Image: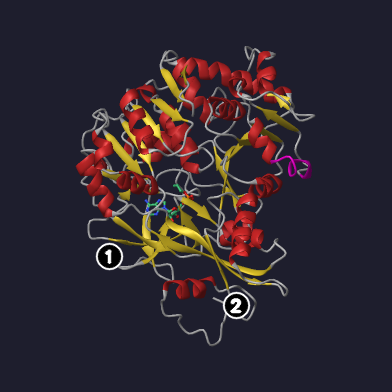
Amino acid sequence: MPNPEISKSNTNINNLQDYFERKKNFDWWSDAFNQMDWLPGGGLNNAYEAIDRHVKNGFGDRVAMIWVGKNDEEEQYSFLDIKNKSDQFGSVIRGLGMERGDRVFIFMDRLPELYISALGVLKAGGVIAPLFSAFGPDPVRDRMEDAGAKYLITSPELRNKLNDVLPKIKTLKNVIVVNKNGRHDEVLVDGDLSYETLMESEGGKDFEIEPTSQYDFSIMHYTSGSTGKPKGVLHRHQAVVQQWLTGKWALDLKFDDIYFCTADPGWVTGTSYGIMAPWTNGVTQLIYEGGFGAQSWYKLIEKYKVTVWYTAPTAIRLLMRAGSEVVEKFDMSSLRFIGSVGEPLNPEAVIWGNKNYKMPIHDNWWQTETGAIMCANYASMPVRPGSMGRPIPGVEMAVIDESFNPLPTGEVGALAVRPGWPSMMYGYWQKDEMYNSRFKKGWYITGDQASIDEDGYFWFQGRADDVINTAGHLVGPFEVESALIEHPAVAEAGVIGKPDPIAMEVVKAFVTLNTNYEPNKELRRELIRFARDKLSAGVAPREIDFIDTMPKTRSGKIMRRLLKARELGLPEGDTSTLEDD
Ligand code: PRX
């Protein structure tokens, strides 16, 4: 049953917390599932929920996207425009032979075509795998090979970065190149297809949405662990239910909002909250192609009268460093709500926000694997600076001990979630064992450490593994180590996160050298450059130390924890036996 209310969004409830208390035993998920506009035949499609549904409900003229390019170009798209263009792209990709479940990689800056093609693929039944455009060739190749990528949608300059690696991806059928507004002299690599030409030849009028089920795969994001290469986290169309609901609950999205999410769709925040949550709630999104800039962001908020802003702690720390004087130059009185995710948000940042933006910054917590917000400081509840808030209704979270039993209030342990929330990952792509290892005694183990206070607020205490969180992006040490040892000088590499006042952590490597190589400044610089070219500036080590021997366990595992303890001048613990964990 179509429910026009979904287009109107919001609950009109001023105090959500009281409302949740009163409806303690309410089945939130069934209710939310009932509010989706199921496809004829009983299917569910997240792109349809985000875009087409509003057109069907008579809201096609509303502005869905205000796009601002890096050279200040501006384009606006209504829900109807996006519906038509994504239908067109859906026809294009089907015409190329894409079948339900095929993995389509999108490696592009934040251009309108990224969103249009992503939605088109989803409506045609494909699985999108967007990648961060700052990646170097190695991470792109690893991910595309792992997923058996069938199609790649990219832009000319990013295509160039991949010239050496694409021929190695044997499953790849087509590369589609978007030449935005003819920015580049179009020189297509032999065999590549032009997005513009394909779109011109395809009306999209006869496009019919694939009758996907709620269980069909829709989006895949790669995430890093402490061991092995990043793994593909598979999400299903049903994740949209929780993305929609948490858009209302945790980000306070209302129908008339102008929403600015600073995350890139290469990361999960940029799809769950940069595509699904805002558009299912019918709000207008401001999408900015450019990167961070205090002045440019404030200018955008002023000019487009942004009301809800979702960003990350590293950005907030940079804004704090830019200072109050910069804030004062702009009229940001349109802002109503600020949210933050991805790293711990320092209590000072919440207080600074209160003083400078006249409202607190609302921290919330979730992961690529959870697909949507799990725990939040809601607009209607008092923010506890430094805490990531309380679990959303329908989500059971706990802090558990080593035997997987809940710990008393205030004690630090493993942060766990009871499985069964709608946006929960389906699996890690072709890594069942790894997936299964995340579930213990009826809990999903998040990999984070936390504690709970007497009022049920959760407090992040750190990660339980070696994964590095730099500027809100997770970096797997293994991926960096693997890149470094490809250099002929490097015998072994151990990589850790070194605390940093802005980025939370920066990547630091310790390397031992092969004989005939001298540790010196030039080699250090060369290794950093080597890693940057392969990986990306954000993932490559910012610092490298040469060491004589690599500390290892008896079975040969590099003891990153020991490297970190040494780096921080902390006690090294008992290392006499150097046993495995
Ligand atoms: O360690 C936690 C940290 O980021 C991890 C999830 O990263 P990712 O899968 O890339 O997803 C990021 C966007 C949701 C978590 O396991 N993290 C996320 N939010 C917070 C956080 N750490 C502290 N406080 C948060 N609010």
The amino acid beneath tag 2 is Lys
In-front residue for pair 485/364: 485
Q: CA distance from mark 1 to mark 2?
A: 37 Å
Magenta highlight range: 162-168
What is the quadrant of the N terminus in the image?
top left
Q: Is residue 463 part of the magenta span, yes or no?
A: no
- At which x and y percent is residue 394? 37, 45
In-front residue for pair 540/448: 540
Residue corresponding to mark 2:
552
Residue corresponding to mark 1:
409
Is the shortest distance between ligand 1 and the CB of mark 1 under 8 Å?
no
The image quadrant that residue 150 belongs to is top right
In-front residue for pair 484/128: 484
- At which x and y percent is residue 489? 69, 67
Q: Would you say the residues marked 1 and 2 are in contact, meaning their CB atoms lie under 8 Å apart? A: no
What is the quadrant of the C terminus in the image?
bottom right
Vertical comparison of 239 with 488: above or below: above
